Amino acid sequence: MATASPREVPTDQANDKRLKILEATMKRHQYRADALIEVLHKAQELYGHLTEDRLLAIAHSLHLPPSRVYGVATFYHFFSLTPQGEHSCTVCLGTACYVKGAMELLAALEAESGLRAGSTSADRKLSLLTARCLGACGIAPAVIVDGNVTGHADPEVMRARVRALLDEE
Amino acid sequence: MMEFQDLQIMAEQERTRRKAIRIHCCTSSGCQASGALELFHQLQAAVEAAGQNERVDIIGVGCMGFCGQGPMVSVEADGVLFEHVRPEQAPEIIASLDGGPCNVKQGDHAHPFFARQMHIVRRNGGVIDPERIEEYIAVGGYQALYHVLHEMSPAEVIDAITRSGLRGRGGAGYPTGLKWATVAKSPGERKFVICNGDEGDPGAFMDRSILESDPHLILEGMSIAAYAVGADQGYLYVRGEYPLAIARLQKAIAQARKHDLLGSQIFDTSFNFRVDIRVGAGAFVCGEETALIASIEGRRGQPRPRPPYPAEHGLWGYPTLINNVETFGNIAPIITNGADWYAGIGTERSKGTKVFALTGKVRNTGLIEVPMGMTIREIVEELGGGTPDGTPVKGVQTGGPSGGCIPEALFDTPVDYESLAEVGSIMGSGGMVVMDATTNMVEIARFYMEFCMDESCGKCIPCRTGTVQMYRLLSKISAGQATAADLATLEQLCHLLRETSLCGLGQSAPNPVQSTLRYFREEYERLLRKRVTINLTSR
Amino acid sequence: MAARTLTINGTLISARSNETVLEAAREAGISIPTLCHLDGLSEVGACRLCLVEIAGSPKLQPACHTTVTEGMEVQTDTPRLKAHRRAIVELLFAERNHICAVCVASGHCELQQLAVEVGMSHVRYEYLSPDCSVDISHARFGIDHNRCVLCTRCVRACDEVEGVHTWDIAGRGTNARLITDLNVPWGEATSCTSCGKCLLACPTGAIFSRGSTVAELERDASRIATIVAARNERW
């Protein structure tokens, strides 16, 4: 469809494209109020996080009070109102992982990155996150780095991976 | 329009196009994390390289259950099972088909982990490609739905489910037939069927695995339920943490629609049924049915007082049937094999099988499906093989943050709804986390209380602020700074939350504390005594 | 409307078939403590103070959300219920920073009255002392989150009676906070009509009119019910 190659698309146009996708999502749900969570999922997927402008626009499109949209966006842990890092490292703290030493693993990664769980490095390189059970209990402890699950995670190996992500140019 | 004959033709075509040898490679989340996708491609490449394309098919299948030994590969027919397979071992496996030497670690079907299981819900797990409807149809899929639509009245379907003795697999064990009957009888212009796939208990992944391995089984179960209660719209509410399950369900729904197995006039009858997916956004409380409904309606996932129950007043005020994934997974097998067959499995009051996620300090971790009534000891010691390093087992935690810890001394308790409740735990959705002598039970109680505190929706006062107080008291005990009075306050709060919280989250939040206090009280008291000692010496 | 006969604390009373236990009790002059309930607004059953014992039901039921039935036997004041109510009020006092001595609503505060009613002499729980803000950006009103009990009466009054929905709750658990619009200062919340219904509905000194000082804030929460009745019956 587009004539320019993707990497040359200027930011406004990229923005425009994302807006169009978001608009299409809302249209597919006929701008129904009950589609709010689905729409927020899509917005977060497109933009990485939910800005106040975006939330306000969604509120207007779905004819919802802004306070309700904000209430929903902050109720669910999946939604983030602050920008996330370029890379993410999520340590599962489910019971099986906990019993298999997930807290020690997390402590090691916190020490290595200098980040507290739930925060993002100042240079936006890395977000260190925790999860409430990924359902990968059979291979506990589990860690997700940029969407890829590692099972039987070893603190030293994971330290090295986190260091590599932080030092990446 | 799909007819019964078309189903049979599809099944026959699928069977005839099969090659002589099918090699199953698990592509579920657990094995994918251990490199199964790369292995899958390497196996395909190895078949190509060996010129075996005409004879051998590599099939990406759902979960085989033995997740701790993944990635797993099995060869159909001769039943060879490979464990911990590395991608570079692919050529060796292909060569072994013709008797070549093979040093890949082999599993044993006679191993109690497999031999003691009984597969009803998981019968297609690890056997069919979950991304192809043809494979589901080839093993008899959607025939139960056809049978129901053409040969049974809704009342007869409900009667069959009632007689089977099936009870809700989400935790509380409410009789499924009774729930269906209530929805069917409740007046409403519209009705809804919801599949609760918000498997939030940490340490549980039964539903994820079922959805990833056999999505059509769940769609068929939901369709049968919709026909029985008179619903025309269904929602599948799945945790956002399960992207692979969501992707496979989306694919399954599209395929079912394409073959007119979802949509209008299914199997040339007046039955219409549409299913939409709703993706959860990270809130444990949404497993509670009224909170789940609020979430589908696009609101904050906060529960409301029951009664009225969703069966009478549910989604947008209409009668709504909510069952969990595993419950729906039992429906088609019950219709196919009959209620009496199902009622013959299990115990007096708990029928059928139950899927458990066996994890923690246990040698064989993974998913198991066993008949109700098997003892915890059999599960942990025989199927699970005890602890990996031989450290004595201390207990097992069932039911997640709403359940309790059962000590080793009570391991002869059979797993059924009543027996587990009697020993202070619950069946729950099926998480079973084994703890050994090194596990600190006060820490476990604190871990669960932190979970409940973080997941409390904040609507009712006892849960919102009581969980915070309990977490602080447990932290104080854990740090050796608590007095006997603190322990008394903790116990009084347990009582308060159980009796006054609005929903199941708050009502059952004390369970891990109360059960550890019941069986491991000395661990708490040892920490209290420490305080006294310090005071005496500093005086 | 058919009548129902039931007993509350052993006294035989009659009620209309669509009434709640709370309504029936109050008509009969039996008081049941409440906090999130406000006549004229929908019920949320959140504060758990009006829980009562009903014969034959193993679980305690909220009087505000339970419809009367024929022959129902209700107990509203047993030692078990009294103990629970006291604990809940104590938990509320420990949750935020409720200092009556400097509060505009002192003497006219429902939370304060509740503490007296349930016989709270001290708080057994650790004070959580959260960091809460005060927002006085609105020209006429202010909100002090230290005194908010998250009963959502303001949210419901604004949504159901004024029809605006300026208020809602953000976050969850004990970190939940009342917000206006997109979590903007109240004075910048463009949807707010400054009608003051939230002020009427608030049971504590959390929402106050600017300029009132200690113990000066007197409000009549029953005006919400009057407005709703006026609207429904088209006076």
Image (cartoon, helix red, strand yellow):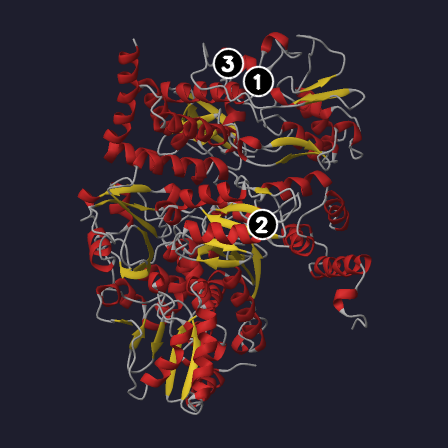
* B274 lies left or right of B332: right
> Mark 2 falls on what kind of element?
helix
Instruction: Give percent across and percent down for residue B524.
Output: 28, 28
Establish if B143 lies above or below B30.
below
Q: Which mark is residue B526?
A: none
- For the residue pair C154 and C207, the one nearer the viewer reads as C207
Establish if B162 lies above or below B258.
above
Q: CA distance from mark 2 to mark 1?
A: 42 Å
* Badge 2 density bin: few <14, some 14–19, many ≥20, Cα 10 Å: some
Establish if B20 lies above or below B308.
below
Q: Give the image quarter of residue B410.
A: top left
Instruction: Give percent across and percent down for residue C185.
Output: 75, 29
Q: Which mark is residue A166?
A: 2
Q: Is residue C119 visible?
A: no
- Which of discs 3 and 1 lies nearer the camera? The answer is 1
* Badge 1 density bin: few <14, some 14–19, many ≥20, Cα 10 Å: some
- For the residue pair A109 and B432, the one nearer the viewer reads as A109
Q: Which mark is residue C115?
A: 3
Q: Is residue C55 visible?
A: yes
Q: Which residue has dot 1 on it?
A: C97
Circles 2 and 3 in contact, beta carbons < 8 Å: no
> Mark 3 falls on what kind of element?
helix
* B142 lies left or right of A1: left
- For the residue pair A121 and B349, the one nearer the viewer reads as A121
> Mark 1 falls on what kind of element?
loop
Residue at (42, 65) in percent of width and height: B31
Residue at (39, 31) in percent of width and height: B499
Label 3 or label 1, whichever comes before in sequence order: 1
Question: What count of labels does the image hold?
Answer: 3
- Which amino acid type is shown beneath numbered disc 1? Asn
